[in-house]
Image (cartoon, rainbow, N blue to C red):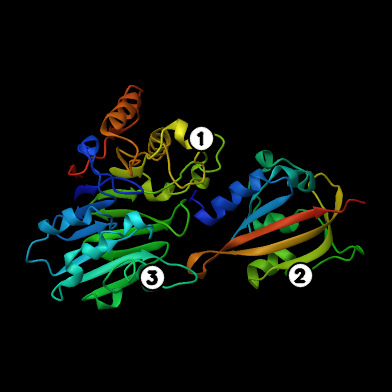
C-alpha cells in the first residue's frame, strides 16, 4: 500500500512562502493498492494535485469523505473525474439523520457557492456510510464515527496484510481530565489499534487547545499518546493549523521528538509518500 | 474489550461532569457507567463495582412503586427505553447495594445514533427530597 499526502492543512488553505514545506492545501490523501486501485481520502483543495497522476486509463475512482466541513470538500468541484463521463466516481460520506448525503453535498455544489450543480456532474455514485466495513477493490475499509462536531468518520484501510488509519479531524481527548484514558472510552481506538501508519489530527499546541476545547481537534501530544496506547507503528501529523508556519511546525515536532516516543513520529508534509 | 460507540463515549463524558445522578446503559442493557451523584443511590462507587451487566442489575435489589408494589422488569423506564425505543418516566423505590431504599423519579431515554442505530439508553434519577 502506498500512501501520498496531497493536502495536509486544516480548516482553510494557507498558501505562502512560510507554508511551502508542510503545504498549504487542505486535506487530501491518496492510497494506492499493490494492484493499482486507488482511494482518495477527503476532497480538500489538495484534490488539484491528485488529478494529474490519475492518467487517461483511469475508469473508476473512489473518494472517501470523513465529513462535509468545507476544508474537506472544497476540492470536489475541481476534481476532473466528476466532469468526465468515462470515469465512474464513487463518493462515500457520513450518514445523517435528517438529510441525504446528496442533499448535504449539494449545499456546497450549487449556486451561489458553486456555479455547477451536483446533479449535473457526470457518472457520480454516492454512498452514505455508517459504522461498519465495506470493500473497494482489494481494500477493506472500516468506518466509525469519531469525536468531532457533526457526523464525522474515521477510516481504517487494510490491504494485503497492511493497515493504515486516517482520522484527520478528531478531538480524541475531549472530556478526559487525564489522557490517555481507558481505551474502551476513547474515540477511534478500535480503528487505529495496531495499524502500521496513522494519519492523525495534530492541529493545536497545548496552549491553544486550552482555549479551544470542543472545537474538534487534538494536540500533537494527545495524538502521540493516543497512537502510543493503540500500538501504532508510525504516526503522521496532519491537519496543521493555518496559523502555524513551517518554522513553528518544525519546532513542535522537534520538541516531541526530544521525548522517548513509543513509535515513529513523522511530519505530515504535502508530497510525502509512505509504503507500508 | 471493544471500544464503545462515540455517542456513548460522549454521553459518558457528559454524565461525568453532571451534578445529578445519571446512568449510561449499552444496547444489551448493561449499566456501563454511572456518575458520582448516582453512587449514593447505587450504594457503591463505580470505580469499585465497575460495569453491572443486565442480569446482575435485575438481581441487585428490589424495585417497587411508591406503594411498595414490585414493578415488573418490562415496566422499568430503562427497559422501556431500550425495548420500545421511547422516553419513559416513573416514580419508584430502589434498594441499592448498601441495602438502603431510595425513593426517586426516574427518566430514561433511548440513545439512537446516526443511521437510526440503537446504541443504549440514559437514565436520570431525581431522589425524593422528603
Q: Residue furthest left?
A: A56
**Is A126 on the left-hand or right-hand side of B123?**
left
Q: Secondary structure at mark 2?
A: helix
- The answer to whether residue A43 of the structure is visible from this angle is yes
Question: Badges 2 and 1: C-beta atoms under 8 Å apart?
Answer: no
> Mark number for residue A210?
1
Q: CA distance from mark 3 to mark 2?
A: 39 Å
Pinpoint residue A260: horizontal percent, then vertical percent: 35, 23
Q: CA distance from mark 2 to mark 1?
A: 45 Å
Nearer to the camera, A168 or B81: A168
Above or below residue B67? Residue A17 is above
Residue plotted at (74% across, 42% down): B44
Q: Count neighbours of disc 2 (C-alpha within 10 A) and say few if under 14, some if 14 to 19, many if 20 or more.
A: few
**Is A106 on the left-hand or right-hand side of A116?**
right
> Mark number for residue A101?
3
Residue plotted at (42% across, 47% down): A170
Question: Badges 3 and 1: C-beta atoms under 8 Å apart?
Answer: no
- The answer to whether residue A33 of the structure is visible from this angle is no
Return the chain for callout 3. A
Q: CA distance from mark 3 to mark 1?
A: 34 Å
Q: Secondary structure at mark 3?
A: helix
Return the chain for callout 1. A
**Is A249 on the left-hand or right-hand side of A48?**
right
**Numbered disc in front, either 3 or 1:** 1
Q: Count neighbours of disc 3 (C-alpha within 10 A) and say few if under 14, some if 14 to 19, many if 20 or more.
A: some
Residue plotted at (76% across, 55% down): B125
Of mark 3 and mark 1, the one earlier in the sequence is 3
Nearer to the camera, A87 or B57: A87
Amino acid at each position: 500500500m502506498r500512501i501520498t499526502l496531497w493536502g495536509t492543512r486544516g480548516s482553510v488553505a494557507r498558501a505562502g512562502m512560510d507554508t511551502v514545506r508542510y503545504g498549504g492545501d487542505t486535506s487530501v490523501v491518496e492510497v494506492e493498492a499493490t494492484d493499482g486501485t486507488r482511494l482518495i481520502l477527503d476532497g480538500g483543495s489538495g484534490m488539484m494535485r491528485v488529478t494529474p497522476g490519475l492518467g487517461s486509463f483511469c475508469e473508476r475512482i473512489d473518494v472517501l469523505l470523513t465529513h462535509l466541513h468545507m476544508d474537506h470538500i472544497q476540492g470536489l468541484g475541481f476534481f476532473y473525474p466528476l466532469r468526465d463521463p468515462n470515469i465512474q466516481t464513487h463518493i462515500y460520506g457520513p450518514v445523517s439523520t435528517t438529510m441525504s448525503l446528496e442533499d448535504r453535498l449539494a449545499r456546497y455544489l450549487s449556486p451561489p457557492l458553486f456555479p455547477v450543480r451536483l446533479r449535473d456532474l457526470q457518472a457520480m455514485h454516492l454512498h452514505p456510510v455508517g459504522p461498519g466495513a465495506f470493500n473497494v477493490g482489494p481494500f477493506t475499509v472500516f468506518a466509525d464515527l469519531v469525536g468531532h462536531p457533526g457526523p464525522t468518520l474515521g477510516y481504517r484501510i487494510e490491504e494485503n496484510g497492511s493497515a493504515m488509519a486516517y482520522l484527520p479531524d478528531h478531538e480524541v481527548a475531549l472530556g478526559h481530565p487525564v489522557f490517555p484514558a481507558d481505551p474502551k472510552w476513547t474515540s477511534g481506538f478500535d480503528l487505529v489499534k495496531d495499524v502500521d501508519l496513522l494519519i492523525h489530527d495534530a492541529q493545536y499546541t497545548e496552549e491553544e487547545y486550552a482555549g479551544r476545547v470542543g472545537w474538534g481537534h487534538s494536540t500533537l501530544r494527545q495524538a502521540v499518546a493516543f497512537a502510543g496506547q493503540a500500538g501504532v507503528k508510525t504516526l503522521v501529523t496532519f491537519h496543521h493549523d493555518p496559523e502555524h508556519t513551517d518554522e513553528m511546525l518544525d519546532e513542535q515536532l522537534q520538541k516531541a521528538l526530544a521525548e522517548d516516543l513509543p513509535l515513529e513520529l513523522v511530519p505530515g508534509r504535502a508530497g510525502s509518500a509512505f509504503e507500508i | 474489550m471493544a471500544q464503545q460507540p462515540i455517542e456513548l463515549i460522549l454521553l459518558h463524558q457528559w454524565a461525568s461532569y453532571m451534578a445529578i445522578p445519571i446512568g449510561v446503559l449499552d444496547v444489551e442493557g448493561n449499566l456501563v457507567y454511572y456518575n458520582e451523584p448516582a453512587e449514593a443511590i447505587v450504594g457503591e462507587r463505580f470505580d469499585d463495582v465497575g460495569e453491572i451487566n443486565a442480569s446482575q442489575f435485575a438481581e441487585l435489589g428490589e424495585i417497587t412503586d411508591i406503594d411498595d408494589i414490585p414493578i415488573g422488569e418490562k415496566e422499568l423506564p430503562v427497559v422501556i427505553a431500550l425495548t420500545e425505543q421511547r422516553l419513559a418516566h416513573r416514580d419508584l423505590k430502589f434498594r441499592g447495594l448498601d441495602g438502603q431504599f431510595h425513593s426517586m423519579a426516574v427518566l430514561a431515554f433511548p440513545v439512537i445514533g446516526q443511521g437510526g442505530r440503537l446504541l443504549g439508553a440514559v437514565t436520570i434519577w431525581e431522589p425524593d427530597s422528603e
